[in-house]
Image (cartoon, helix red, strand yellow):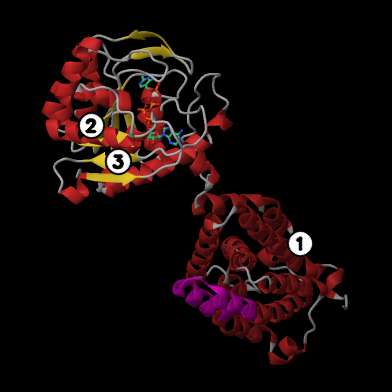
């Protein structure tokens, strides 16, 4: 099996014709490859003017140009698998064969496209012999029942057993594994099978059962199946397992084909229906983007804090001493309760690293911060103070966030106390000259250890937000912004009526 890219994403080249309505040919191949987790590339063999009703005309570009397209890909890109579809005529087959001979791609899935569902020829009748020759270069051939009959030069199989017997003869004759497909049989069953005459008796025919879906959206199913197989084979390895996975995906895509409302004939399948249904449309912002946008979304609050008379007074050093002491007493009350909420975040944390971080922060909040404030206030004052309305409101918000039991919401609510203090601290530090009355307090929040804690807290919150659903992420932001607003009120309180207000 071929070596897939470092990322494990198979690089798959489709060599096929076009369908401007996007349901078959190279357009369908690229969608199938992407839908099955591969990186799709495409070399055009023939330009086909067709729609869901049929083929109008075919233009085969000069063969030199086909060779140039093929070389442009293989000279640059390591190819994990090739899917070959419409080859149009003997000249095209010759160029592709020579390229295969030279490049030796590790996996080649050959869909021997001859006649479209609409009955139009996609391969010159006199090119059938050349196509037969190409079979031995393939890892897997995926003929439908009419194509299988032409390749073994027998009448068209009327039963599944006949189709399997023909597939076995084709496999034996050309030394290639064959996928026999039941799409053209009558009845409710649509079985497919991997038929490999080189395998022992038990493994010669490995069938994948299927149920017919009543739908006219079956244009391009053969193209889609073969490119899905080319994409899955490098990763899955086993052909029958790859077929089972491809068939499961294709059934889902056929089932949703009608939702597309493309054309009034045989419509396309909906290649991404399953992905879309399972959240494939949801774009996820990165943690870094989220942190930046949350910070931006509280720019108004940050501006208000910087402009508040309290912070300006702190910076200038002319803040009323009583107001400052009252603020510190409230801060001490806040920090003791904040420590309990941090401990709750530790209890809910999904990883040991986060558990330890919030527990350490809880301890730091009690020990470090209270020690500083006790130094300023004296034990008496700290423990005698009553919480103000603003302090109570902020702590109630944190307690309510903790009570939800949602880790993401809780840590989002805890974050502004880190981030806004750190941010304000960086600017206040510049004012902390030797004779500044609040110097030691100003320096606390610009401590390098606090910078590290702040960055880790931002990282944990932003990562949780990046993993969350839209609704959960929005609840996290609401809790974050509410805490930021409480921070603003906390800075305003010492110089407003709240200082004297009683609950
Ligand atoms: N109505 C259906 N319901 C379920 N699966 C189907 C249906 N029609 C085709 N398939 C599946 O689609 C794949 C292609 O089968 P089919 O025999 O139609 O090949 P094909 O004729 O080469 O396709 P195309 O329509 O592109 O020419 C197979 O896996 C087959 O089982
Ligand atoms: C370029 C191109 N390749 C293959 C098919 C076969 O698909 P279908 O048999 O579903 O029309 C097609 N119509 N066009």
* Residue 471, picture quadrant: bottom right
**Observer-nearest of 222 and 461:** 222
**Observer-nearest of 74 and 298:** 74
Residue position for label 2: 166
Q: Earlier in the sequence, mark 1 or mark 3?
A: 3
Callout 1 secondary element: helix
Crowding near pointer 1: few (<14 within 10 Å), some, many (20+)?
A: some
Q: Residue at x 58, y 74 (%)?
A: 345
Q: Residue at x 37, y 13 (%)?
A: 120
Circle 1/circle 3 CB separation < 8 Å: no
Q: Main secondary structure of the magenta part?
A: helix
In the rendering, which numbered label is found on residue 309?
1
Residue 19 located left or right of residue 453:
left
Circle 1/circle 2 CB separation < 8 Å: no
Q: Is residue 298 magenta?
A: no
Q: CA distance from mark 1 to mark 2?
A: 89 Å
Q: Position of residue 314 (x, y in %)?
A: 69, 67
* Pair 1/2: label in front: 2
Q: Earlier in the sequence, mark 3 or mark 2?
A: 2
Crowding near pointer 3: few (<14 within 10 Å), some, many (20+)?
A: many
Callout 3 secondary element: strand
**Observer-nearest of 31 and 421:** 31
Residue 129 located left or right of residue 244:
left
Q: CA distance from mark 3 to mark 2?
A: 12 Å
Circle 3/circle 2 CB separation < 8 Å: no
From this view, report whether residue 316 is shown above or below residue 241. Answer: below
Callout 2 secondary element: helix
Q: Is mark 1 within 8 Å of ligand 1?
A: no
Q: Is residue 360 magenta?
A: yes
- Span colored in magenta: 339-362
Residue position for label 3: 193
């Amino acid at each position: 099996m071929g070596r897939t890219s470092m990322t494990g994403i198979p690089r798959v080249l489709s060599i096929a014709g076009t369908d401007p309505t996007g349901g078959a040919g190279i357009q369908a191949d690229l969608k199938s490859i992407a839908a099955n987790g591969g990186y799709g590339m495409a070399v055009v063999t023939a330009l086909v003017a067709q729609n869901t009703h049929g083929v109008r005309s075919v233009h085969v570009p000069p063969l030199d140009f086909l060779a140039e397209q093929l070389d442009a890909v293989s000279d640059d890109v390591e190819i994990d698998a090739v899917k070959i579809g419409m080859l149009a005529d003997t000249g095209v087959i010759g160029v592709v064969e020579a390229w295969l001979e030279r490049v030796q791609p590790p996996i080649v899935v050959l869909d021997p496209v001859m006649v479209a569902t609409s009955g139009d020829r996609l391969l010159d009748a006199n090119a059938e012999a050349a196509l037969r020759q190409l079979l031995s270069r393939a890892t897997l051939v995926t003929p439908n029942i009419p194509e299988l009959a032409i390749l073994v030069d027998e009448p068209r199989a009327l039963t599944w057993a006949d189709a399997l017997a023909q597939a076995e003869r084709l496999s034996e004759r050309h030394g290639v594994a064959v996928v026999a497909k039941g799409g053209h049989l009558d009845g409710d069953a649509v079985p497919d099978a991997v038929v490999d005459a080189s395998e022992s008796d038990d493994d010669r025919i490995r069938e994948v059962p299927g149920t017919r879906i009543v739908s006219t959206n079956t244009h391009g199913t053969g193209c889609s199946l073969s490119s899905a197989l080319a994409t899955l084979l490098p990763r899955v390895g086993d052909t029958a397992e790859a077929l089972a996975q491809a068939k499961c995906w294709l059934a889902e895509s056929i089932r949703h084909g009608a939702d597309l409302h493309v054309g009034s004939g045989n419509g396309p399948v909906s290649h991404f229906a399953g992905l879309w249904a399972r959240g494939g449309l949801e774009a996820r912002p990165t943690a870094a983007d989220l942190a930046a946008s949350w910070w931006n979304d509280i720019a108004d609050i940050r501006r208000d804090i910087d402009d508040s008379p309290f912070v300006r007074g702190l910076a200038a050093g002319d803040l009323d001493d009583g107001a400052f002491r009252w603020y510190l007493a409230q801060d001490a009350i806040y920090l003791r309760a904040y420590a309990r909420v941090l401990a709750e975040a530790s209890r809910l944390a999904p990883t040991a690293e986060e558990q330890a971080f919030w527990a350490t922060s809880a301890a730091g909040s009690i020990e470090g911060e209270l020690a500083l404030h006790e130094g300023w206030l004296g034990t008496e004052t700290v423990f005698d103070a009553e919480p103000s309305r603003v302090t109570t409101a902020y702590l109630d918000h944190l307690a309510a966030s903790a009570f939800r039991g949602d880790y993401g919401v809780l840590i989002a609510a805890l974050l502004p106390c880190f981030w806004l203090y750190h941010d304000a601290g960086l600017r206040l530090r510049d004012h902390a000259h030797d004779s500044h009355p609040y110097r030691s307090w100003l320096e606390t929040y610009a401590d390098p250890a606090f910078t590290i804690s702040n960055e880790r807290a931002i990282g944990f919150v932003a990562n949780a937000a990046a993993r969350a659903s839209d609704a959960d992420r929005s609840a996290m932001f609401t809790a974050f912004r509410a805490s930021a607003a409480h921070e603003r009120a906390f800075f305003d309180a010492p110089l407003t009526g709240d200082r004297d207000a009683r609950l």
